[in-house]
Image (cartoon, rainbow, N blue to C red):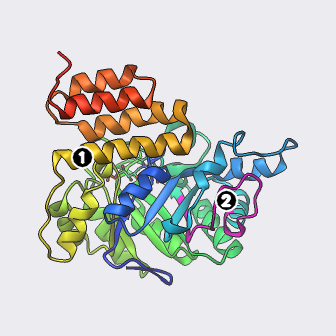
Amino acid sequence: MKIADIEIKNGICLAPLAGVSDRTFRAMARRFGAEYTVSEMVSAKALCYEQLCKRPVTAERTKTAPLAAVRREELPMAVQLFGAEPEFVARAATLLESNEYRGTLSEVPPSVIDINMGCPMAKIVGNGEGSALMKDPVLAASVVRETVKAVKIPVTVKIRAGWDRDSINAPELAKRLADAGASMICVHGRTREQMYTGKADWSIIRAVKQAVEIPVVGNGDIFCADDARRMYEETGCDGIMVARGAQGNPWIFAELQAAAEGREYTPPTAEERFAVALEHAHGLVEDKGERVGIAECRKHLSWYLHGMRGAAAARNAIMQASSMQEIEQIVKDLRDGAHFL
Ligand SMILES: Cc1cc2nc3c(=O)[nH]c(=O)nc-3n(C[C@H](O)[C@H](O)[C@H](O)COP(=O)(O)O)c2cc1C
């Protein structure tokens, strides 16, 4: 797959996950085979307003800049913006492209700007942002057109099937967005109404693929290589994005790469799972400091340890832990077969 000039050989991508796909998570996904990653969603308005702030914008004060931070070794990657006002999204995109905004923590600009038209959360759609844009195709196209005009790097869009089952419009909307200059469309085959329940309807992804010339990435319910194979076969998509399937399981990308290249896949040993889980926790603490890092590593560790003997008790102990030392001991005890009885 190619997004403008950016080659993504096997089309294997990590989807954006607010509160999850920070740079530690993206680095893990990358290490095991994700060829392209997307940041957590970033408010276009917040990024713009920080530039007007009278007080200095420092790394400690800003909540927005760390979400948009890109390291050189992460490329190719996208920073995802959300917003419903074309001028704010376009302005935020120019800030990201120039990498000269106040508070930036980026070593380099992102390769791509992605625009969120899929978020179902009430506080986002209440502002007309995220999946609410699917209800206003003219405005949605204008957000894309103004952003494409404002930057040289490619602009892509992530959409859902539609707002609800009576207003499935992904194929028509995708066509408008492609005409407005989008370089790729990712389709999550659920409606806003479904949130994350039920099954993703992959026939919508196929309909989008048939409606546009630009690359289409299929998303929704890929949890193993067989799902990915079916996604390609049933939809004709150019690439795939995995979100929940990567939580506590960066090896899914190794599995997908092995399948794409016709190689045998060997799942990680328990030992490797423990080691990578702890490495992930350490990465979070290093990046965000002990207090935030420990709070955030709890959910990741419970994903990594899911299904292991004694994991439920270990998870409870991790919830109470307040230092990395305690967390290491809990994981070590679990590994050594102590089940916290
Ligand atoms: C916790 C969580 C956070 C998410 N955050 C974002 C986001 O910031 N931007 C976005 O476009 N989609 C977001 N999504 C949607 C996912 O990218 C993806 O479309 C959805 O989970 C379906 O894919 P999956 O079946 O592989 O999980 C999020 C999903 C979850 C579960």
Does the image show residue 326?
Answer: yes
The picture places residue 158, in percent across and down from the top left corner, at: 46, 61
**Secondary structure under the numbered disc 2 in the rendered image:** helix
Question: In which quadrant of the rendered image does the N terminus lie?
Answer: bottom left
Q: Amino acid at mark 1?
A: Arg
Q: Amino acid at mark 2?
A: Val
Label 1, residues with CA under 10 Å away: few <14, some 14-19, many ≥20: some
Is 261 situated above or below 118?
below
Q: Residue at x 17, y 36 (%)?
A: 307
The picture places residue 317, in percent across and down from the top left corner, at: 31, 21
Q: CA distance from mark 2 to mark 1?
A: 40 Å
Q: Which residue is mark 2?
A: 89
The majority secondary structure of the magenta stretch comes to loop
Q: Which residue is mark 1?
A: 273
Q: Residue at x 60, y 63 (%)?
A: 138
Is 28 situated above or below 98?
above
Label 2, residues with CA under 10 Å away: few <14, some 14-19, many ≥20: many
Does the image show residue 120?
Answer: no
